[in-house]
Structure formats: structure tokens, C-alpha cells
Image (tube, rainbow, N blue to C red):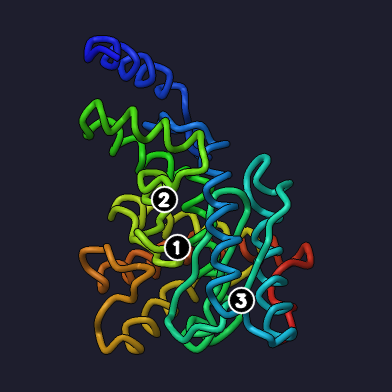
């Protein structure tokens, strides 16, 4: 394919991407078909379940699924109707993730940091927001725009076959090995903080617990950000922003609790 033809394709894709929006109705830069990312997420999660150790604790699995399902019920549009799979992995690293295609993974290590149900909701709400705000598609779109024409062609060729596609793996937050989660950009992390805190409030959880969770994270890491939230420039400011937003979200949480939502998942 000639360079000029590739440029035309990229320009056309950029024009189409202007129609993409996030759950807030804001235009986003996303040139990637969601079916591609969903397929990658499904494949990666299946591989994780083979390579990683799934927790044998049925009570723990049910607890995490219960909290996650409460959050899923509050997701926008088709995300709430999607058939999500939730798995707890027996791994002491404080990590959690959500992948396109309706997959959520939680490490047992995060349950030592999330000291109550609301704090676990803050973790999972953050990760679900990465998916609903299409951060994976935006990540790979920026990579597409910056890579050489030959690599763009290679990415599309690989995504349509059985060959492993490092570009799309990076887009959904996977490293060169399945199971290695890469941090999103600072902008995306901050957006997921805000959206995840609102999501947990809509599910009836106390939004103030999001800031407390981050304090626990910092304490567990001896002052260093954990892997799953490692890109924020200033952890202290992050906690301050979460704490400052909590009072405005309290009425939302109170309304949800009046409707019977909120903490009720036995552990």
C-alpha cells in the first residue's frame, strides 16, 4: 500500500473518530472497533485463567462477584446488560483490572488493602470505568496515529488473525506477557477515579471510602503508588480530590441506599 493511501485511511479514520463519545457525551479520539478489543479481552482473560491460580475460596469469589454486580447494574447503556465474568485470582499483589469484553479480575492481595465492601467497590468501580470510558481504544488510537505506516498496517493485519497483537494488548492494558497490567495515562487514571467514585455512589456505597482506600494503598506500599494506579503524579492530591468530591456525591449514595442498594455482600 502506498504511503499516500495509508495517510488517506488514517485521515478518514480520524474524521470518523470525532463521532465517538464517552459516557458523559464528550467526544473522544477512538479509531478502534470495539469488537477487536472485546475479542482481545476475552482471549487474554481465558489465558489468565489457565496461567494464573484462581482462588479456590468460593465465599471470596461470591463476595467479589456480589460487589461487582452491584456496580455493573449502574453502568451506562449496554455495559449494564453485558454478561460479565468476575474471577478472583490467588495473587498477593494488590491489583485489580477490567478488560473489554466483560471481564473483571481481582487479586486476593487487593482484599487486604480494601478493608470494607465500599473500598472494594472503589477499586472495581475505577477499573470498570476504564472500560466504559473506552480508555483502551483511545490508547491504541493514539499509538496508531504516532506509529509508522508499516506498523499501522501490521497492527490491523495481526488483529484479524490468530497472531498475537502487541498493539492491541497494550491498548487494553496488557504487557508483553498476559497477566502483566500496564498503567493507563494520568488523564485516564484521573477520569477513572472520578467516574468510579460516582459509580460506587450510584450503587449506594459511601464515596468517602475512595479516598480512604487510597490512603490504605499508600500505607501498604510504604508511600509508593501500587501498580494498578501507578501513573498519578501526586498521590496526596489524588486523595484530596477524592475526598473533596465525596460530599457532593453523598446525596446520590443516600438516594441509592433508600432504594435498597449499598452494602449487603457477605464475606
Secondary structure beneath label 1:
loop
**Do tag 2 and tag 3 residues touch (Cβ < 8 Å)?**
no
Q: Which residue is mark 1?
A: 178
Foreground mark, 2 or 3, reads: 2
Residue 123 location in percent, x, y? 50, 70
Residue 131 location in percent, x, y? 51, 50
Chain-order first, disc 2 or disc 1: 2
**Residues under labels 1 and 3: Cα distance?**
16 Å
Q: In percent of the image, x 62 and y 64: which residue is there?
A: 253
Secondary structure beneath label 3:
strand
Q: Which residue is mark 3?
A: 88
- Estimate how packed mark 2 is, as few (under 14), some (14 to 19) or many (20 or more) residues with alpha carbons within 10 Å: many
Q: Quadrant of the C terminus?
A: bottom right
Specify whether 32 is left or right of 200. Answer: left
Specify whether 48 is left or right of 138. Answer: right
Q: In percent of the image, x 45 and y 67: which residue is there?
A: 179
Secondary structure beneath label 2:
helix
- Estimate how packed mark 1 is, as few (under 14), some (14 to 19) or many (20 or more) residues with alpha carbons within 10 Å: some
Residue 237 is marked as: none
Chain-order first, disc 1 or disc 3: 3
Position of 230 relative to 27 (above/below): below
**Residues under labels 2 and 1: Cα distance?**
8 Å
Residue 244 location in percent, x, y? 38, 65
Q: Which residue is mark 2?
A: 169
Q: In percent of the image, x 60 and y 69: which residue is there?
A: 49
* Closer-to-camera residue (168/84): 168
Amino acid at each position: 500500500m502506498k504511503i499516500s493511501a495509508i495517510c488517506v485511511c488514517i485521515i478518514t479514520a480520524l474524521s470518523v473518530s470525532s463521532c465517538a463519545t464517552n459516557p458523559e457525551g464528550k467526544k473522544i479520539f477512538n479509531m478502534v472497533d470495539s469488537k477487536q478489543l472485546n475479542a482481545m479481552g476475552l482471549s487474554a482473560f481465558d489465558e489468565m485463567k489457565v496461567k494464573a491460580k484462581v482462588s479456590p475460596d468460593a465465599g471470596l469469589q461470591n463476595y467479589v462477584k456480589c460487589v461487582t454486580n452491584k456496580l455493573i447494574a449502574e453502568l451506562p447503556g449496554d455495559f449494564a446488560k453485558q454478561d460479565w465474568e468476575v474471577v478472583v485470582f490467588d495473587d498477593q499483589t494488590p491489583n485489580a483490572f477490567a478488560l473489554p469484553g466483560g471481564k473483571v479480575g481481582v487479586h486476593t492481595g487487593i482484599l487486604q488493602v480494601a478493608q470494607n465492601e465500599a473500598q472494594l467497590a472503589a477499586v472495581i468501580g475505577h477499573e470498570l470505568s476504564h472500560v466504559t470510558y473506552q480508555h483502551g481504544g483511545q490508547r491504541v488510537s493514539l499509538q496508531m496515529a504516532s506509529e509508522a505506516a508499516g506498523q499501522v498496517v501490521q497492527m490491523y493485519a495481526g488483529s484479524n488473525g490468530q497472531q498475537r497483537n502487541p498493539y492491541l494488548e497494550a491498548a487494553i492494558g496488557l504487557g508483553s506477557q498476559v497477566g502483566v497490567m500496564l498503567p493507563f495515562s494520568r488523564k485516564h487514571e484521573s477520569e477513572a477515579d472520578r467516574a468510579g467514585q460516582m459509580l460506587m455512589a450510584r450503587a449506594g456505597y459511601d464515596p468517602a471510602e475512595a479516598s480512604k482506600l487510597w490512603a490504605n494503598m499508600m500505607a501498604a506500599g510504604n508511600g509508593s503508588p501500587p501498580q494498578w494506579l501507578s501513573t498519578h503524579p501526586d498521590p496526596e492530591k489524588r486523595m484530596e480530590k477524592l475526598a473533596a468530591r465525596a460530599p457532593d456525591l453523598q446525596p446520590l449514595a443516600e438516594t441509592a441506599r433508600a432504594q435498597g442498594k449499598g452494602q449487603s455482600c457477605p464475606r
